[in-house]
Amino acid sequence: MLTLHHCVSARSFRPLWMFEELGLPYELVMHPFPPRVHDEAFLAINPLGTVPALFDGEVQMTESAAICQYLASRRPEARLGVRADEPGYADYLNFLHFGEATLTFPQTLVLRYGHFEPPERRQPQVVEDYSRWFLSRLRTLEPRLAREPFLCAGRFTAADVSVGYALLLASHIGLEERFKPAAADYWRRLQAREAFLRALAAQHEAALAQGVSPKPAMEAGGGG
Ligand SMILES: N[C@@H](CCC(=O)N[C@@H](CS)C(=O)NCC(=O)O)C(=O)O
């Protein structure tokens, strides 16, 4: 059984979305954000204190983009991965990692210094600088997304889940209004996917059932 430790709309949304795209059975364990602050026992589950934490038998993983790649390989027939002998392979790896390293990292600074730090430690300049960092890197996708419905290989892949999560996070922190047209259309296409909607519903229901707030931490406020 696949077990995913998850906080509402955190990076662990990537594996959750992949489960739904692939139709894999899974167990979702919800935590309030940030888990290391609310539950010291979480450090025994993941010494990093972060989500996602994925368990699959003996397998333990903590990097959301790597987990997407791993899950895609569990059901190769679904073609959410790109094989090394397919033409889109290099793009696939590139965008899988671009979603986390280039598009999510700057947003964590926006979140920290715009939402999570106490008011006296907030840094509006950091928030604006790293918002622009994120938006300027997102803009590099415009020509590709104006040409193609998805990032690579002529189909929806785990790379779209990786980048799509960065767009979900951006929508939670007020950056969506600053998307350029092709990125805005792409984001609309991703949100219309049934698996994306099922993943949103699954985290909502699991949060309520497990006594965790169903609101994303960046909208509800909070520390960490
Ligand atoms: N590179 C990791 C980052 C994991 C990460 O930082 N997760 C955040 C949630 S989006 C977290 O758990 N933060 C809580 C904390 O830092 O205490 C990934 O892609 O999964």
Image (tube, rainbow, N blue to C red):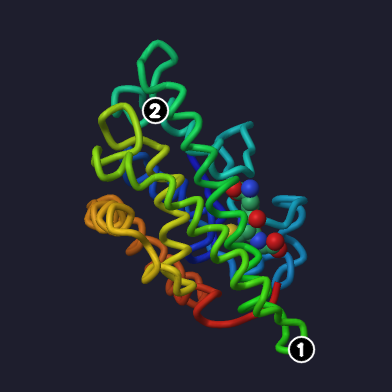
For label 1, count other residues whose C-alpha is less than 10 Å away and answer few (under 14), some (14-19) or many (20+).
few
Frontmost residue, 113 versus 135: 135
Frontmost residue, 133 versus 201: 133
Quarter of the view holding residue 214: bottom left
Give the quadrant of the C terminus: bottom right
- Residue 94 at x, y = what percent? 50, 32
Residue at mark 2 to residue at mark 1: CA–CA distance: 45 Å
Frontmost residue, 70 versus 84: 84
The residue shown at (28%, 50%) is: 195
Viewed as shown, does residue 72 lie left or right of 34?
left
- Residue 186 at x, y = what percent? 28, 51
The residue shown at (41%, 63%) is: 203
Residue 118, compared with residue 64, is above or below; it is below
Viewed as shown, does residue 140 lie left or right of 192?
right
The residue shown at (29%, 37%) is: 156
**Would you name the residue on which mark 2 appears?**
81
Q: Is residue 70 visible?
A: no
Q: Secondary structure at mark 2?
A: loop
- Residue 198 at x, y = what percent? 29, 57
The single residue placed furthest to the bottom in the displayed view is 120
For label 2, count other residues whose C-alpha is less than 10 Å away and answer few (under 14), some (14-19) or many (20+).
many
Count of marks placed on residues: 2
Q: Secondary structure at mark 1?
A: helix
Indicate the amino acid at tag 1: Glu
Indicate the amino acid at tag 2: Gly
Q: Quadrant of ligand 1?
A: bottom right
The residue shown at (43%, 74%) is: 208
Nearest to viewer (mark 2 / mark 1): 1
Circle on res. 28:
none
Q: Is residue 148 visible?
A: yes
**Would you name the residue on which mark 1 appears?**
120
Sequence-first tag of 2 and 1: 2
